[in-house]
């Protein structure tokens, strides 16, 4: 039985890659797309996207009322991603969300809604399996290396900083590392922000440049040694296996899961 999918953000870099993935997966059926510029058109009408007759809606409520769907994939921006996710669950459609930038309060609210509606939801800061392993390995290493800095690098069109992956990595590290001030006790910044953001003494640095996709390195230091755990996504195809897995998994769930590592 096919899994009917609505996808938001088909013209984006991630969204267009996800459109192709959904269309090529035998168990998936793309039944509609959400796009703010092409209301009432078909997917085939958008230059650069597959020649398929898939209806496009601007208003998500109208789409959910007119189209029968099992899963909603959101790959948009933080400003609308939260609203999309909430609306999907209110309509008993299971969201798979790659949009980052949600606040902790929004995650809590969405978790409560998922429990109330008994509707599965997966929000993943990063759908690349290698990135998830990088985060988990960093959590393990933090037990033995208490001095750590995170350097994340993304394309210059990314809206949030630090990235959702960097925030999730820091949260996992906090599970095994006690808060600690790093660097020289009298350290000063001659240029404000030179040492990056700080979380429990950890430093997080965000780089935004054209030509990048998604990259992160977690640097650990201890007496006489350093440890570097690094992951690079060289193209957006690297995220598709994680999205595909999440679509299958969310069909079996009745609560919200934050982070791909929780379903691997």
Image (cartoon, helix red, strand yellow):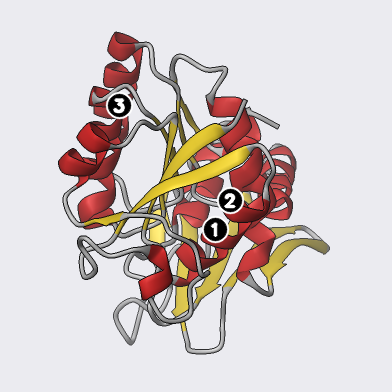
Residue at which label 2 appears = 22
Contact, mark 1 vs mark 3 (Cβ under 8 Å)? no
Query: Is 22 placed above or below 13 here?
Result: above
Outermost residue toward the right? 224
Residues at marks 3 and 2, CA–CA distance in whole angstroms:
21 Å
Locate residue 131 relative to residue 119 in the image: left or right.
right
Please identify the quarter of the rendering in which residue 56 is found: bottom left
Residue at which label 3 appears = 89
Outermost residue toward the front? 53
Taking the spot 41% from the left edge, 55% from the top edge, the residue there is 54
Residues at marks 2 and 1, CA–CA distance in whole angstroms:
6 Å
Mark 2 neighbour class, 10 Å CA radius: few under 14, some 14 to 19, many 20 or more: many
Residue 20 shows in this picture:
yes
Residues at marks 1 and 3, CA–CA distance in whole angstroms:
21 Å
User: How far across and down, in percent of the image, does residue 130 sit?
Assistant: 73, 53
User: How far across and down, in percent of the image, does residue 98 sit?
Assistant: 46, 50
Taking the spot 19% from the left edge, 57% from the top edge, the residue there is 58
Camera-nearest label, 2 or 1: 2
Residue at which label 1 appears = 18
Task: Identify the mark nearer the N-term, 1 or 3.
Answer: 1
Task: Identify the mark nearer the N-term, 3 or 2.
Answer: 2
Locate residue 140 relative to residue 158 in the image: left or right.
right
Taking the spot 69% from the left edge, 69% from the top edge, the residue there is 232
- Tag 1 secondary structure: helix
Residue 216 shows in this picture:
no
Contact, mark 2 vs mark 1 (Cβ under 8 Å)? yes
- Tag 3 secondary structure: helix
Name the image quarter holding the N terminus.
top right
Locate residue 177 relative to residue 123 in the image: left or right.
right
64 or 55, which lies in front?
A: 55
Taking the spot 33% from the left edge, 54% from the top edge, the residue there is 55
Camera-nearest label, 3 or 2: 2
């Amino acid at each position: 039985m096919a899994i009917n999918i609505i996808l938001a953000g088909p013209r984006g870099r991630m969204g267009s890659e996800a459109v192709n993935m959904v269309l090529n997966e035998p168990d998936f059926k793309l039944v509609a797309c959400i796009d703010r510029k092409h209301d009432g058109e078909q997917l085939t009408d958008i230059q650069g996207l597959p020649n398929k007759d898939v209806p496009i809606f601007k208003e998500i409520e109208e789409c959910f009322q007119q189209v029968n769907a099992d899963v909603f994939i959101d790959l948009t921006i933080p400003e609308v991603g939260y609203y999309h996710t909430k609306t999907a669950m209110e309509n008993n459609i299971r969201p798979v969300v790659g949009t980052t930038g949600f606040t902790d309060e929004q995650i809590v609210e969405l978790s409560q809604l998922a429990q109330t509606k008994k509707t599965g939801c997966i929000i993943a800061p990063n759908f690349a399996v290698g990135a998830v392993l990088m985060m988990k390995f960093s959590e393990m290493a933090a037990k033995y290396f208490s001095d750590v800095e995170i350097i994340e690098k993304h394309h210059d069109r990314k809206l949030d900083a630090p990235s959702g992956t960097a925030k999730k990595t820091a949260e996992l590290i906090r599970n095994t590392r006690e808060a600690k001030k790093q660097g020289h006790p009298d350290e000063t910044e001659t240029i404000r922000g030179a040492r990056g953001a700080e979380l429990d003494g950890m430093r997080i640095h965000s780089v935004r440049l054209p030509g990048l996709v998604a990259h992160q390195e977690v640097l650990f230091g201890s007496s006489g040694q350093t440890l570097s755990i690094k992951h690079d996504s060289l193209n957006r195809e690297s995220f598709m296996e994680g999205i595909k897995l999440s679509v299958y998994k969310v069909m079996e769930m009745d609560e919200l899961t934050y982070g791909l590592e929780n379903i691997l």
